């Protein structure tokens, strides 16, 4: 039986608190401006003007400083949690601090969390849905698993519907560092066909729309793959981008050569291969992808 989600602040504009309001948070704000009251946590006074220009009320606070988060209690009907964990360790104390602050007075009726498909580790190119168990292979992914678990426990304990979006590679021409042309221009190599891995993608605008759909229609304690319909290996993705951008294709190297030429972070992405089923995104959140393939997104 599907549990009914409580309505968000009837008879008034609901209030959304955004934690980690970078590129995707600003895209969400553009979609919701005028229909929601928007708040965002920022650690930098330099961003106050930018957030205000986007129709967002800035709140100076730091997810690493629990005392600075006390004022958040009771402020919002919903939370969009886009903030990454710290860069070290196996836990995510930022999520713990945020949930502790929000729990003081209650009032949060829905949470959407942006996680990563890296929590699955290497799947050998298998195609799968959200029921697959996690198997994080890096500390970075383990921190995300810890955050997910904390959020789901919070949701069950408080009755707050929590939607976890597991997100693959995000791209867009207007996203900083978010277009493959930059990597192509640097001449960064990709794996030879026999060593290549499947990779997954989502256009930044579709991800923002997925966040909004989850705020309105996310089922309680539900995981959703926020991915497009593409099934491409990484080298083919960069070949396609090179063709569309009129740039030379990236050089192909063996996995052994990659171990000598690429950074540990780059190698970690080349060691994981998976294909994501996104039926929940389309059926439960009723999202019609604006860019269902990377070809349509890169050409758009």
Image (cartoon, grey):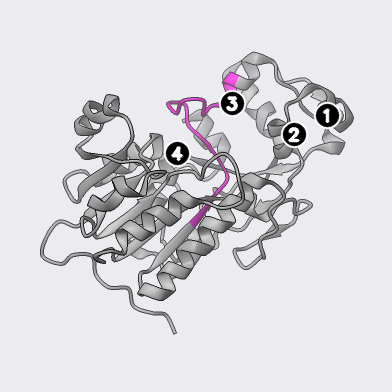
- Label 3 element class: helix
Inspect this view and state whether residue 3 appears: yes
- Label 4 element class: helix
Which sits in the foreground, 88 or 30?
88
The answer to whether marks 3 and 4 mark residues whose Cβ atoms lie closer than 8 Å is no
- Label 2 element class: helix
Which sits in the foreground, 219 or 50?
50
The disc, 4 or 1, on the residue closer to the chain's N-terminal end is 4
Mark in the foreground, 1 or 3: 1
The segment highlighted magenta reads 165-182
> Which residue is painted at 44% across and 66% down in the image?
284
> Which residue is painted at 37% across and 44% down in the image?
65
The answer to whether marks 4 and 1 mark residues whose Cβ atoms lie closer than 8 Å is no
- Label 1 element class: helix
Q: CA distance from mark 3 to mark 2?
A: 17 Å
The answer to whether marks 1 and 2 mark residues whose Cβ atoms lie closer than 8 Å is yes
- Left/right of residue 10 with respect to residue 113 in the rendered view: left
Q: CA distance from mark 4 to mark 1?
A: 30 Å
């Amino acid at each position: 039986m599907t549990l009914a989600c409580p309505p968000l602040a009837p008879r008034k504009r609901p209030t959304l608190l955004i934690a980690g309001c970078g590129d995707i948070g600003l895209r969400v704000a553009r979609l919701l401006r005028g229909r929601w009251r928007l708040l965002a946590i920022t650690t930098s006074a330099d961003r106050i003007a930018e957030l205000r220009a986007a129709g967002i009320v800035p709140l100076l606070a730091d997810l690493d400083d629990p005392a600075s988060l006390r004022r958040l209690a009771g402020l919002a009907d919903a939370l969009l949690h886009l903030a990454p964990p710290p860069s070290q360790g196996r836990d995510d104390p930022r999520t713990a601090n945020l949930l502790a602050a929000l729990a003081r007075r209650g009032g949060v009726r829905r949470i959407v969390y942006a996680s990563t498909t890296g929590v699955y580790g290497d799947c050998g190119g298998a195609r799968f849905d959200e029921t697959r168990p996690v198997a994080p292979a890096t500390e970075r992914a383990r921190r995300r698993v810890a955050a997910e678990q904390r959020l789901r426990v919070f949701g069950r304990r408080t009755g707050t519907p929590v939607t976890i979006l597991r997100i693959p590679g995000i791209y867009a021409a207007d996203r900083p560092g978010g277009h493959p042309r930059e990597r192509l221009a640097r001449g960064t190599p990709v794996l030879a066909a026999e060593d290549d891995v499947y990779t997954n993608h989502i256009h930044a605008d579709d991800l923002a729309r997925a966040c909004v759909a989850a705020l309105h229609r996310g089922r309680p304690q539900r995981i959703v793959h926020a991915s497009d319909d593409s099934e491409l290996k990484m080298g083919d993705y960069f070949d396609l981008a090179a063709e569309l951008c009129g740039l030379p294709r990236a050089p192909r190297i063996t996995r052994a050569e990659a171990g000598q030429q690429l950074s540990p972070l780059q190698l970690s992405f080349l060691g994981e291969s998976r294909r994501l089923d996104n039926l929940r995104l389309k059926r439960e959140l009723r999202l019609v992808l604006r860019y269902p393939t990377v070809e349509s997104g890169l050409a758009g």
